[in-house]
Amino acid sequence: MIDIAGLREDKRPQSSRIVHALLDRLEAAERERDALRIELNEIRYGVAVAHDTIKALRAKIETAENDAAHQKALAESALRVAEGWEGKCGELRAALQHEVDCVEAAKAKIASMEKQVPVAEIVSFGCHDLKEVAWKKGKMPALGSKLYALPGAQPAHSAPSEEAAAEMGANGGHVVEAERLAFEAWMRGHCWKLGAKWTGTEYRSAFEKGGMVDMHAMRTRELWAAWRDRAALAAALEIKP
């Protein structure tokens, strides 16, 4: 490093005005250098701060993007659930309308039955208070028809034992396709909608995924199990010696 103060104190002849002028320029250059150093340090500090700020902003942007993606996924999931419930509500409305239609059909059938004309009448003949059935024209039952004294009376039949019924309930009967088709026809006769579709082995609803249970499908399975097992018990009684 140049000793400027020492050169200024030098009284030798060579220390002319030119030398002093050069020394002045050198001092000015050193001051400018020092100022530039300070400015450069400030610039470096500003660049470091800007770098940290940019890094923090990038982290915030990434977090915001992740949150936006998460919120979007939640919104899409909620939309799917809402659409599923909307479809389910539509099915329930259709099922309710079907039940209403069936009730109205049953009312009309009852009203028609109440207006029936008797097909026969018990009349007396002879002198000993004898009675006979006088059939109206065209109303004679088919040959072999059985007549009962009370409406709905049926011939006595053998019921399965409690032990056989309990065993059938525990193990279940075999699936017979004809019985399954008869079961669906019986459901239609009652105006009861099937709450599930036959998969080849059981009745299952499209909503029963991921451990979900459809109560309408469960009701259909319970009714089918009752029909299947009762048919199996009846078949066992028929072949019993």
Image (cartoon, grey):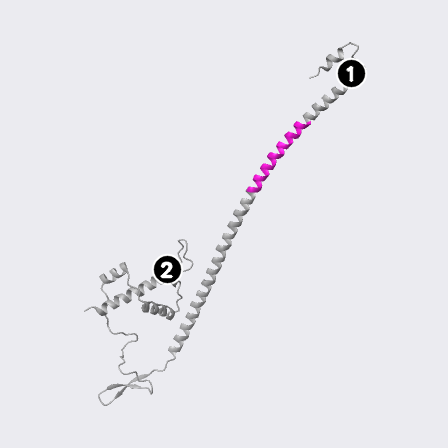
Q: Residues within 10 Å of mark 2 (few under 14, many from 20)?
A: some
Question: The magenta stretch spans which residues?
Answer: 39-62
Task: Mark 2 or mark 1: name the one nearer the start of the chain.
Answer: 1
Q: Is residue 87 magenta?
A: no
Q: Amino acid at mark 1?
A: Val
Residue 21: quadrant of the picture: top right
Above or below, 80 against 17 in this view is below
- Label 1 secondary element: helix
Which image quarter is the N terminus in? top right
Q: Is residue 76 left or right of residue 28?
A: left
Nearest to the observer: residue 226 or residue 57: 57
Q: Amino acid at mark 2?
A: Met
Q: Is residue 217 left or right of residue 40?
A: left
Name the residue tied to disc 2. 218
Question: In whole angstroms, how far apart are the C-alphas of marks 2 and 1?
Answer: 110 Å
Question: Which residue occupies 68% across, 25% down?
Answer: 37
Nearest to the observer: residue 55 or residue 84: 55
Q: Is residue 44 magenta?
A: yes
Residues at discs 2 and 1 in contact (Cβ within 8 Å): no
Name the residue tied to disc 1. 19
Image position, residue 204 (x, y; %): 38, 60
Residue 179: quadrant of the picture: bottom left
Question: Which residue occupies 71% across, 24% down?
Answer: 33
